[in-house]
Image: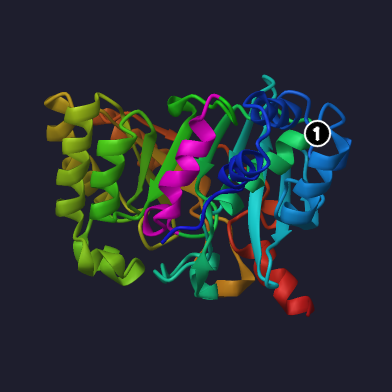
Amino acid sequence: MQPISKYEAIQHILSGLKEPAYRFKQITDAVFRHRIGDFDRMTMLPQSLRTVLIQELGETILGIKPAQEKLSRQVSKLLFALPGGEHIEAVRLSYKRGWDSYCISSQCGCGFACRFCATGSIGFKRNLTADEITDQLLYFHLEGHSLDSVAFMGMGEALANPNLFEALKQLTDPRLFALGLRRLTVSTIGLLPGIARLTEEFPQVNVTFSLHSPFDEERSSLMPINERYPLQEVMDALDRHIRLTGRKVYIAYILLHGINDSKEHAKALAHLLRDRVKKGQLYHVTLIPFNRSEAIGSSYRQAEADRVNRFLTMLTSKGIHASVRTQFGSDIDAACGQLYAAEKRLR
């Protein structure tokens, strides 16, 4: 059974105290319009109510605490402390056109053991609650930052955590974060039940599929989940998602030097998508430079720029929409799991 959210708890408290219905709006306006996170500073509320909220929920509406921050030119990476002593990471990317994008975590650690992933080397600790997921964004909001777009591409596999769907409800609730569905992106390594549920319940949320190799055997060696949910079955599920929603699916492809950046890989990826694209299926490949991490050693390196460009050219020449993601934050361990691992080494 999922725990009730803090927002539901507030409504229960107000109901128990027989407070007027407008009190909840006063609280949510204080948080989401006026950026007031401390209950005692919500002076529009009676002191007696503020006292009860503090007794029941603590001094602040924020349930996680920033423990460490690393800054780069356009990147802010936060390590948050969770109740119980664990940590998670979130990243804010600031674009020159004035757009702030966020990469947030859905789990503490990850149990799927992708070979090149720093979070995968940590192992699975636990699922985040819906509040812990959305609190990452609430922190940035209370600090005065705009929440322009959000991607579940931080620690963990979002579709492995059933609390994701409650978090999506919070983020799109007009009384709370009020984010548009198309400003949200869920990244997955290919969990078929989660893809089906997302298609059904949140069809307008963007989906990114982490592919990383078009060859089943190699993908299984890099990403063991491929044994459970083979590539072709995942692609069929994504085809269905596109047919039912009319929404584009993004294919994430981390280029690893000498492993998945060859001409053969580019041709096979183009072959995987070409007939789908011809039939009107909406796919876009995003090529991602690899961020090296001490947590996974030196087995994987970033593909060289000329190989990245060659890979991109081969895809586009076959009619595949593709682009290279701008690399941010390599100087501050911006890849998910790196800051967590560094903090653990300091203990």
Front one among 109 and 315: 109
Q: Where is residue 146 in the image (x, y as percent from the top left)?
A: 69, 27
What quarter of the picture does the C terminus occupy? bottom right
Q: Residue at x 48, y 60 (%)?
A: 156
Q: What element carries label 1?
A: loop
Mark 1 = which residue? Answer: 36
Q: Which residue is drawn at 15% across and 52% down?
A: 232
Q: Residues within 10 Å of mark 1 (few under 14, many from 20)?
A: many
- Residue 40 seen: yes
Q: Residue at x 19, y 60 (%)?
A: 230
**Residue at the outermost top position:** 97
Task: Give the magenta part as a residue range.
Answer: 157-174
**Residue 162: within the magenta?**
yes
Q: Position of residue 126 (x, y in %)?
A: 51, 69
Q: On the rendered structure, is 102 left or right of 219?
A: right
Q: On the rendered structure, is 5 left or right of 50?
A: left
- Residue 38 seen: no
**Residue 111: within the magenta?**
no
